[in-house]
Image: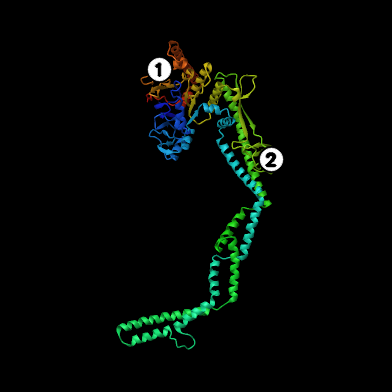
Amino acid sequence: MLSELRISGLGVIEEAVLDLHPGFTAVTGETGAGKTMVVTALGLIGGARADAARVRAGADRAVVEARFEVGPTDAAIGLVEAAGGRLDDDGSVIAVRTVTADGRSRAHVGGRAAPAATLAELATGLLAVHGQSEAIGLLRPAQQRVVLDRYAGLDTELETYRRVRTEWLAAAAELRDRRANARERAQREQVLRMGLQEIEAVAPQPGEDRDLVDEVRRLQNADTLREAAQTAATAVVGADTLTDTPTAVALVESARRSAAATGDVRLAAVAEQLHGVLAVLGDAGAELAAYLTDLDADPERLEQLLARQAELKTLTRRYAEDVDGVLAWARDAAAELTGLDSSDEAIEALRGRVREAAERVAAQALLLSARRTEAAGRLGTAVTEELTHLAMGRAAVEVRMTRRAGASDTVAGGPHDAGRDGESDGSGSPALQVEGQWVTATADGIDTVEIVMTAHPGAPALPINRGASGGELSRVMLALEVALADVDPVHTLVFDEVDAGVGGRAATEIGRRLAELARTHQVIVVTHLAQVAAFADRHYVVDAAASGLVGRSSVIMAGADLLAETDGAGTDGGDMTGTARELELARMLGGTDSGSALAHAAELVAATRADRAERSRRSTGATGTAGSKEKTRANGAPRRRKTAATR
C-alpha cells in the first residue's frame, strides 16, 4: 500500500505531502492547479521517462518520494535487497525519483542508487497508474491482448512460448543461411580441404623452417668455413706438416718455462697463469679439430635441404608467414570445416531440428490460445456485468479472438516444409502451421484479440474504438480494471480522469464502483466530478496560488476523514472543518459557493454516507464476521494520522 507521497518542484507544485490510507482517496482541484501532477509523480515512481519540462520553473530539480507498506513475504522486499537497499525502520519501502532541470534522472530504492528500470520493476508489483493515455491505448488490439493476458495470468505461458519461438527462429535462420549460401559454403569447404590436404602432404614440423636455414647456410659455406677453421687450428696447435711458423701453444709454453726457471716468486705466479692459458689453447684446438671433422661437404644433403625449403616456402606463400603460422591456419581450417558441412545430409538434419522446434512452438501457441479463449469468455461476462453498475445496463462486451493468417510460402520450418524457411509474411513475423492452418507467429502468439461492444440489444457489435463514446470508453476501462482486480496482485490503483466525458447518473455510478473497488484495493482517483469525489473516504484538494509570474500549488485535505467518521472516531482533518469538503464539492458542481451549490454538495455527502452504510450493512449481512475480517485484511485498521500537506 502507498502510505505517503512527497512531491517537490514538480510542475506547479512547490512542495506537497500526501498522507495516504487504505480505501478510496480523491484528488481534486481547479484546472491548472496541478492535480494531474500527482499522477505524474506516481508515473515517475513507476519508471516513466524523465521530462525536464515537468520541473517547476525556477527549481533546479523535481523530487518524488513514495513510501510503500509491504508484507513480510512481498516480492518487493527481494527486489530492494537485490538492488543493495534496505527496508526502512518501520518495514516500509522508500522509492525516490529525481529529475534535474537539464533532464538528468536518478532513482533510489531502499536508500541505494538504482536504475530507473529497477524502480519500474518494483512499482509493477505495487502500483498501477491508469491515465488518459491508457484509455487511448486500450483502443489498440495489442493492448487489449495485454489486458486479456493479465486477466488470464499468462506470464509463465507467454515466457515459455517466447523462449521456444526464439529457438525455432534461430534454427530456421541457420537453415536459411545454409541454403542461401550453399554454393559459397561448398566453395569455401573445397578451399579448406585442399589446403589441409596440401599441408598434410608436406607435413611441416614446428620451427622446421628456422632449423633448415641454419643447416643450409652451413653446407653452402663449407669450403670457406673449412679454410677459416684450418687457419685457426694451425695458429693454435700447428699443422700436420712441418713448418717454421711457431704455434700459439709453443710460444706460450716457451714463455712459461722461462718464467718458471728464474725462481722469482712473481714470475712463478705468471708461469702458473700461462699454464692455464695452455689449457685453454688445448681446448680450442680440440674444438677446431672436431669442427673440421664434422664439416665434410655433402652436396646430396644440401640438395635435399634446398628441396625441403622450397616445399615449405610454397606453404608459407599461401597460408602464413612461417611454418608455425601454417600449422595454426590448419587448425583453424579444420575447426571451420566442422561448421561448414553443406552436404544434403547436414541440411536434412537441420531441417529436422527446425520442424521439431516448430512443433514445440505450435504446441505452446495452442496452449496460449486455449487459455486465452477460456479467459476471454469470463472477462467479457465480467465486464458486461460491471457495466450494469455503471449506467450501461443495456451494453454487452465481448472479447473476440482470431488467429493471424499466414501464407504457406513464408514458413519458418514446420511439419510441412514449404522450402522457404524463416521468411516473413510481410508483418515481420514468420508463418507457422497449426492444426493444418498457416498462421502468423508473433512474439505474443498466434491470436488477435479484439474487444467489441454492443451498445444495446439489436445493435451491431463494434470494436470499442468505433462503438464506444469517450464517456463509455472510460467506463469500459473502469469495468475492466474492476474485473482485473480479482486476479491482479497490484494493491494500489491510480486513476486519472477515469470519468472523462461522463456526467449525471453515470458519474454517480462510477463513484460507487470505485468505492466498491476500494474495499479490496487502495484506490487513488484524480477527478473533476463532484459525484465521484463524494464517494471518497478521503479527499485532497490541490490548491493553486500565484507568486509573481510563477504559479504555486499545495495539497490540503478537504474536510473530514470519512472512514474515521464511519468508525465513530471523529474527524481527521487537522484544523480543517467538515464544511471544507462541501465547499470543494460545491465548487466542482457549479463553480460557486452559493447556497444552492452548498446544499447540493451537502446532499451528495449525505447520500454517499447513506450508500456507504447500506453497502456495509449488506456486506456484513452476507458474510458475517468473515466479511468484516476480510475488509480488515484488505484495508487495514484506520490510521488516525494528522493531515499531511503543505508547501
Q: Give the x, y percent position of residue 587.
A: 44, 16
Residue 399 position within the rendered picture, expressed as x and y whole percent measured from the top left: 61, 27
Q: How many marks?
A: 2
Mark nearer the N terminus (2 vs 1): 2
Residue 374: image x %, image y %?
61, 30
In the picture provided, is 261 more to the left or to the right than 379?
A: left
Q: Position of residue 38 (x, y in %)?
A: 44, 27
Give the camera-side residue of 77 and 296: 296
Q: Is residue 142 visible?
A: yes
Does residue 321 sit above or below 594 in this rendering?
below
Q: Is residue 145 above or below residue 265?
A: above
Q: How is the image coloured?
A: rainbow
Residue that label 1 marks = 580
Kindly give the residue lying farthest to the top in the view shown. Answer: 595
Between the C-alphas of marks 2 and 1, the distance is 70 Å
Q: Disc 1 on helix, strand or loop?
A: helix
Q: Amino acid at mark 1?
A: Ala
Q: Answer with left or right where residue 642 lies relative to residue 510.
A: left
* Residue type of the residue flagged with mark 2: Asp
- Mark yes or no: residue 435 visible: no
Q: Is residue 294 above or below residue 637?
A: below
- Residue labelled with disc 2: 409
Question: Which numbered disc, 2 or 1, marks the residue closer to the eye?
Answer: 2
Say which of 508 and 528 sits in front: 528
Tag 2: Cα neighbours inside 10 Å, few (<14), some, or many (≥20)? Answer: some
Q: Residues within 10 Å of mark 1 (few under 14, many from 20)?
A: some
